[in-house]
Amino acid sequence: MKKRTEIPLNSADFESVDDVDPRSGVVVESRVWAWGVQNIHDLGQYTTGTDIESFIKFILRSPSVTYFHNLAFDGTFILDYLLKAGYEVTDDRFVKHRIETTIDGFGKFYRIIVHAGRTRVEFRDSLKKLPMSVKTIAKTFDL
C-alpha cells in the first residue's frame, strides 16, 4: 500500500510597496518586495524571498495549504501574477494550469486553488477563522 504523505500547512505574509511616479504622484505599480512562509508543523522550515515571482516558484514546487491573514489583499498579487503567466480561472480539469477561487459577491476571498500540472496548492484566509487583527490574536492567545 502506498504511504500517504502529509501536505504541508503554512502561514505566509507579503510586504508590498506602491511605486509612485515622482512627477505626477500617481501609483504606477503595487508590488511585493518581501515574503515569508512558515511551515506551522516544523518551525525550522521558514523561507523568505524578495518578489512575487520567487514566491510563486517556491510555493508551486510541491502541494501545500497556505494561510494568509486577509487573503483579499495578498491574493490579488497571486492572482495578478498567475493570470499574467497564462493561468486560467476555470474548473475545467483538462486545463493543466488553472485557478479556482471562492470569492463572494462582496469581494471577500475565502480560498484560491492553483493547479500547476500535477501540483495543487491552496491558499486560505485565516481572517475567516480568527476575525481579528494579528495584534489582537497575539494578545488573545498570549503570544
Image (tube, rainbow, N blue to C red):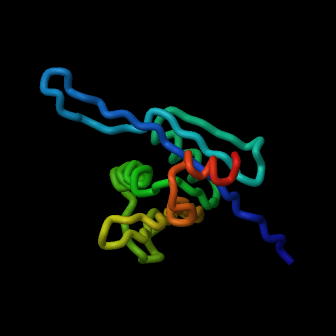
Q: Nearer the viewer, residue 140 or 66?
A: 140
In the image, taking residue 51 as reference, residue 136 lies left or right, namely right
Viewer can see residue 116: no
The residue lying at 67 percent from left, 58 percent from top is 9
Q: At 23% from the left edge and 34% from the top edge, which residue is drawn?
A: 28
Residue 88 point in image, percent of width and height: 37, 64
Number of disc labels = 0
Quick check: 3 above or below 30?
below
Quarter of the figure with the N terminus: bottom right
Residue extending furthest toward the left: 24
Vertically, is 17 above or below 4?
above
Q: Quadrant of residue 31?
A: top left
- For the view shown, which residue lies furthest in the top direction? 23
Which residue is located at x 69 percent, y 46 percent?
A: 143
Q: Please state the horizontal and vertical placement of residue 103, each as a whole percent of the image.
A: 38, 69
- Residue 71 at x, y percent in the picture: 46, 56
**Residue 13 seen in the figure:** yes
Image point (71%, 52%), residue name? 40
Residue, far right: 1
Q: Quadrant of residue 129?
A: bottom right
Query: Up-down: is 23 above or below 102?
Result: above
In this rendered view, identify the residue nearer to me: 129 or 64.
129
Report which quarter residue 57 is drawn in.
top right
